Image (cartoon, rainbow, N blue to C red):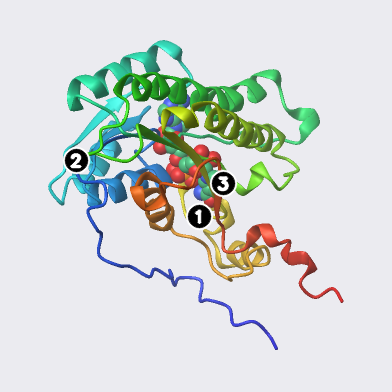
């Protein structure tokens, strides 16, 4: 039987009212002026957390994120920092502590793509992607761990001393021709996350990743902007629709909350089945 295809314009968006599972917690989301970071910051705010919205260049967009994240009564502030720069990151975490007095949640989201055939990839193209996608996550996670260790567990706030959520990609698993620097950075995030998780578990610091599949954001616009591109994209998605940023937001709220307190060192794939090797579905 032929699969029923979702209409190009239709966004499948089940929605339930937010529960304040992060009431009183303080969060920092990197790269939150657009796309997934924006949706995550808003979802954390709706769940009761105060949020620092990090951005690199788009202050106005970051302020829009902050306005939405604080709609339900929590606080949201914006902060400019380039996550690939050690000093920027240090100052950003100092500011988060100055603003909020503590920090409970880091969402390591900022990321870029510079796509080239492998043999046309310059050292600069390679370094830029690794610097933001991998080194940026290292720098932010390191600051967060230092803070979480100092704070320890405060039972009234959370069962954990702190939570780190790395936004990885299905390409931490699936090789990606023409995007070698990106896939290498996300493969790196996978073992960065797992190794840090192993090391800091005794301190009650929880570390996990979310691996999005194809999500409707500016980073992959050419894959969903036209009906033809969207049709092509669906061939790789067993669930037959693109994902929405808010769906990553809901996963992040769960991973940040005590509802997932026994979940540690995993990658949660939110990908409509993209990692099920859909090309094999008709093989007998
Ligand atoms: P996006 O381009 O909307 O978001 C990336 C954000 O990172 C932007 O706000 C950008 O300003 C910020 N950023 C880039 N460099 C930065 C730096 N040096 N310092 C601080 N911020 C910086 O795209 P998105 O899809 O929302 O991507 C968010 C994350 O999700 C990325 O890590 C990306 O790899 C990952 N991801 C996205 C998809 C998808 O289908 N959209 C799939 C898998 C993984």
Q: Report the side of 177 relative to 185 (left or right).
A: right
The residue depicted at 73 percent of the width and 27 percent of the height is 121
Residue found at the far right of this picture? 284
Residue 267 circle label: 3
Query: Is residue 104 left or right of 203 when viewed as pictured?
Result: left
Q: Is residue 76 above or below residue 254?
A: above
Q: Are marks 3 and 1 in contact (CB under 8 Å)?
A: no
Q: Residue at x 64, y 69 (%)?
A: 238
Q: Is mark 1 within 8 Å of ligand 1?
A: yes
- The residue that mark 1 highlights is 215
Q: Point out which mark residue 24 bears.
A: 2
Q: Residue furthest top?
A: 87
Residue 166 visible in rendering: no
Q: Indicate the position of residue 132 as horizontal and vertical percent values.
A: 52, 26
Question: Which residue of the protein is positioned furthest toward the left in this rendering?
Answer: 73
Q: What secondary structure is marked by label 1? A: loop
């Amino acid at each position: 039987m032929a699969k029923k295809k979702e209409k190009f314009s239709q966004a499948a968006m089940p929605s339930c009212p937010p529960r304040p599972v992060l009431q009183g917690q303080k969060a920092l989301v990197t790269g939150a002026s657009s796309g997934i970071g924006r949706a995550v910051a808003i979802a954390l705010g709706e769940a009761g957390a105060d949020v620092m919205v990090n951005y690199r260049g788009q202050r106005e967009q970051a302020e829009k994120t902050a306005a939405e994240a604080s709609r339900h009564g929590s606080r949201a502030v914006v902060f400019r920092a380039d996550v690939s720069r050690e000093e920027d990151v240090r100052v950003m975490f100092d500011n988060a502590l100055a603003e909020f007095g503590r920090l409970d949640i880091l969402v390591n989201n900022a990321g870029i793509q510079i796509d080239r055939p492998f043999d046309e990839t310059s050292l600069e193209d390679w370094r830029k992607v690794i610097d933001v996608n991998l080194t940026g996550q290292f720098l932010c996670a390191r600051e967060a761990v230092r803070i979480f260790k100092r704070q320890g567990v405060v039972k009234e706030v959370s069962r954990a001393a702190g939570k780190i959520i790395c936004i990885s990609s299905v390409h931490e698993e699936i090789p990606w021709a023409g995007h070698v620097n990106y896939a290498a950075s996300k493969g790196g995030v996978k073992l960065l996350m797992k190794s840090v998780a192993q090391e800091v578990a005794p301190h009650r610091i929880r570390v996990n990743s979310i691996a999005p599949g194809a999500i409707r954001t500016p980073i992959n616009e050419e894959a969903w902007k036209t009906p033809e591109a969207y049709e092509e994209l669906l061939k790789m998605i067993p669930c037959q629709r693109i994902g929405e940023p808010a769906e990553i937001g809901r996963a992040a709220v769960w991973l940040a909350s005590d509802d997932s307190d026994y979940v540690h060192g995993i990658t949660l794939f939110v990908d409509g089945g993209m990692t099920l090797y859909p090309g094999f579905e008709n093989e007998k």
